[in-house]
Amino acid sequence: MSESVAAQPAPLTSHSRVAGLFDSDILYSFRRSRLTMLAALVTLLIIVSAVFAPWIAPHNVFDLGQVSLMNSNLPPAWLEGGSREFLFGTDDQGRDIFSTILYG
C-alpha cells in the first residue's frame, strides 16, 4: 500500500512579510513619485496639526467666553491694522481664523 502525503506550505515568518513589503511594487512606486510623497507629507501635516490643535492654537474657538464681537473682521497680521494676536485675522463673529483652521 502506498500512502499519499499532502505537501504542506512552509509557514511565513514575519521577516519574509517585512521583506515582501519593501520589495513590493506599491512601495517602490510610492518612493519614486515625488508628487505622492508630497501629498503624503501634506496629509500627515494636516492630521498632526488637527490632533495637536489644543496645544498649538492660540485661541480656543469653542470657548464662547473668549469670543469678542469687538474683534470681528480684523485683517491678517501682515496687513495694515492687523495684530499678531490674530495671525490670519478674525471672522465676522470675532473668532480667530488660524485657530479655526487648526481645529478643522
Image (spheres, grey):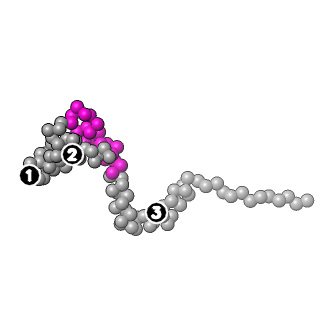
Q: Secondary structure at mark 3?
A: helix
- Which residue is pictured at 66% across the width and 57% down the height? 10
Q: Is residue 72 above or below residue 15?
A: above
Q: Is residue 55 left or right of residue 11?
A: left
Q: Of the residues tagged 1 and 2, which is closer to the observer?
A: 2
Q: What residue lies at 22% left-to-right and 31% top-to-bottom?
A: 65
Which residue corresponds to mark 3?
Answer: 27
Which percent across, then down, holds residue 17?
55, 56
Amino acid bearing label 2: Asp
Q: Look at the image and tell me whether residue 34 can be seen.
A: yes
Q: Which residue is mark 2?
A: 91
Separation of residues labelled 1 and 2 (CA atoms): 17 Å
Q: Earlier in the sequence, mark 3 or mark 2?
A: 3
Q: Is residue 48 magenta?
A: yes
Which numbered tag is attached to residue 34? Answer: none
Earlier sequence position, callout 3 versus callout 1? 3
- The amino acid beneath tag 3 is Leu
Q: For the residue labelled by badge 2, is the local secondary structure a helix, a strand or a loop? A: loop
Residue 80 marker: 1
Magenta span: 46-67
- Which three-letter amino acid code belongs to the residue tagged 1? Glu
